[in-house]
Image (cartoon, helix red, strand yellow):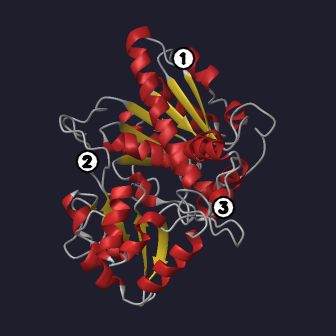
Amino acid sequence: MLAQGALTGIRVVDLSRMLPGPYCSMMLADHGAEVVAIEDRRFQGDDLFFSDLNRNKRHISLNLKDPRGLAIFNRLADQADVVLEGFRPGVVERLGVDYQTLSRRNQRLIYCSISGYGQHGPLRDRVGHDVNYLSRAGVLDLCGDQHSGPTIPGVQVADVAGGSYNAAVGILLALYAREKSGQGQYIDISMTDGVLGLLTLPGFLAGRRGESPRRGDGLLSHRYACYNSYQTADGRHLTIGAVERRFWENLCRALEEEELIPLQYDEGRREEVIDRLRRLFASRPLAYWEELLGGREVCFTGVQRLEDVLTDPLFAEREMVCPYPDEPAGSGRLAFGVPVKLHGTPGGIRSAPGEFAHATREVLAELGYPEAEIDELYRAGVV
C-alpha cells in the first residue's frame, strides 16, 4: 500500500463495471485505499473489461448468484469501509448485497450506488448511457454548432464528471461523517443529477439575457470572436478565450488588428469580427500562431490531439503522463497520472493494472480459504 496515502487503511469493495464506478474506485486507490474489484466471469464476453481502471487494485472474479460466492462477498464486506456498486436499481436487493442487508452485519459500512437516473423517481428503471444522461439534463443541447444538431462529446462527461467524481466526493464526505458519528450511511449518485449542475453558469448567463441558452451561441460558446475556435492553414485548430477586455486588447495588438478592440462584444458586428479572425487564422499554420501568441497574455491554446498530449512537456513535468511502475523498458505503455496533488499525503501509481481476476487466489487465501477449497471454487465456476 501507499506509505502515506490519504486513504491508506481504507478498504473498498467495488462491484461496479465499465466506467463510472471503476473510475471512482481508481481515484480512491490512487490515494492509498485498498480496493478489491469484483466481476463475474460470465460477463467477459461483453468485452467491456477496461483494464487501465484497475491500477492500484486487486481484481477477482466472483459469481454472486452462487451461495458460496455470496459467502465470499460477505466476508469481504464485513471487513470493508466502503462498498461501491453500479447495477440498475433493484439488482443488489435481488442478489442480497444491498445496503440494508450488509449494514446489519457492518454498521460502519459506507455504501455507494451509482446509477443513471437515481434510486428513486420516475426514471429509476430506465436503461441508458452517457449520451442519454447528457440529453436528459439539457447538457447535450448546448454541445456543437448552432447550425447543426447536438454533437456527442468524445469523452464520457456524465459517467466521469456526473458519476465518478460525485461518488468519490460522497464517499469522502461519508468517511468524514463516520469519524464523528461512528456510523456508515448510504449514498445515492445519479449521473443525470451530476451533470445537471454543469448548467449553473449557462443558466446564470441565460438569466441575464432573458432567454434560454442556445447551442453554439453563448458568451462562452462561439457567439463572440473573443471566445471561439478557429481553423488554421494546415487543418489544425486553435482556441481563443479572451473574455476580459485586457486579453482581447492584447490579442488584437498582437494580430495588428487594433481596430477590432472596441468591437469585442458589439452585437451588430460580431459575425463580421468572427469572420475576420477566421480568415486571418486560416492564413497560417498552427505552428506560426503558437510562435506568435503562445507567450503572450491573450488566452490562446492550440487544440492538441491525443498523441500531442502524450508527449507534451507540461504533462510530463506535472507527472500526468507517466510510465507504469515495473513495466519493461521500451514497452511504451503510459498512464494518466493523479490530478489531485496532495503534498503531505500524495497519491501515486503503485502497480500496473493486472489481467481479469488476477488476484482471486490471493484474496481468497487472505480470507482463510485453503488451497484445495479454492481449487474447488474454480472448478465449480464460483470464481
Q: Quadrant of residue 15?
A: top right
Mark sitting earlier along the chain (2/1): 1
Badge 2 is on which residue? Answer: 348
Badge 1 is on which residue? Answer: 105
Task: Label 1: state its secondary structure.
Answer: helix
Instruction: Judge the density around disc 3: few (<14), some (14-19), many (≥20) Cα neighbours within 10 Å.
Output: many
Q: Amino acid at mark 1?
A: Arg
Label at residue 77 = none
Q: CA distance from mark 2 to mark 1?
A: 33 Å
Task: Label 2: state its secondary structure.
Answer: loop
Using residue 70 as the reference point, say whether residue 346 is left or right of it.
left
Query: Please, which residue is most extreme toward the top here?
Result: 181
Q: Amino acid at mark 3?
A: Arg
Using residue 69 as the reference point, say whether residue 360 is left or right of it.
left
The residue depicted at 67 percent of the width and 40 percent of the height is: 65
Mark sitting earlier along the chain (1/3): 1
The location of residue 232, given as percent across then percent down, is 43, 84
Badge 3 is on which residue? Answer: 215
Q: Say which of marks 2 and 3 sits in front.
A: 3
Q: From what the image shows, is residue 337 above or below residue 249?
A: above
Q: Quadrant of residue 141?
A: bottom right
Query: Please, which residue is most extreme toward the right here?
Result: 122
Q: From what the image shows, is residue 55 above or below residue 372?
A: below
The location of residue 41, given as percent across then percent down, is 57, 55
The residue depicted at 68 percent of the width and 36 percent of the height is: 118
Q: In this rendered view, identify the residue nearer to me: 315 or 202.
A: 202
Q: CA distance from mark 2 to mark 3?
A: 39 Å
Q: Amino acid at mark 2?
A: Gly
Q: In this rendered view, identify the residue nearer to me: 236 or 79.
A: 236
